[in-house]
Image: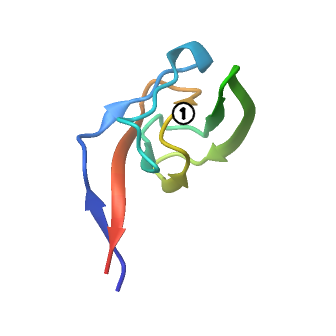
Amino acid sequence: MQRTKLIETEVGLGTDLAGGITVSNATVVRVYNGSGDVATVSVAKSTTDGYTGISTVSLPAAQVEFFEKMGADLIWASANTVKAAKVGFTN
């Protein structure tokens, strides 16, 4: 049975690219939408020229999703009540 390994304390996400964070250079991020409404979550790929290739998904209220990204990639949400934590998976 696969389990979630908590690595860092949950933090609030910024609400735009400028407020995006790496979540302690996480490669797997657990995201919880505590906004009470649908929120969007975006990830921007880190490159030598800055950040490009923004991908965005909708996350329903009170839902959890796991996102895989490169450590330097930025993640943010449309509401400041969306929280993220650096996690891993274990058996």
Q: From the viewer's perspective, is residue 90 above or below residue 29?
A: below
Q: Which image quarter holds the N terminus?
A: bottom left
Q: Secondary structure at mark 1?
A: strand
x and y percent of residue 6 in the render?
25, 55
The quarter holding residue 88 reads bottom left
The quarter holding residue 75 reads top right
Q: From the viewer's perspective, is residue 33 above or below residue 12?
A: below
x and y percent of residue 39 in the render?
59, 36
Label 1, residues with CA under 10 Å away: few <14, some 14-19, many ≥20? many
**Amino acid type shown at disc 1:** Ile
Q: From the viewer's perspective, is residue 77 above or below residue 56?
A: above
x and y percent of residue 55 in the render?
72, 39
Seen from the viewer's position, the closer of residues 37 and 17 is 17
State the residue lying farthest toward the front: 48
The reply, left or right, for residue 64 in relation to residue 77 is: left
State the residue lying farthest toward the right: 53
State the residue lying farthest toward the bottom: 1
Residue at 48% over, 41% down? 71
Read off the residue under disc 1. 75
Seen from the viewer's position, the closer of residues 36 and 25 is 25
x and y percent of residue 52 in the render?
73, 28
Residue at 51% over, 34% down? 72
Residue at 25% over, 51% down? 7
State the residue lying farthest toward the top: 18
Residue at 70% over, 20% down? 49
Q: How many marks?
A: 1
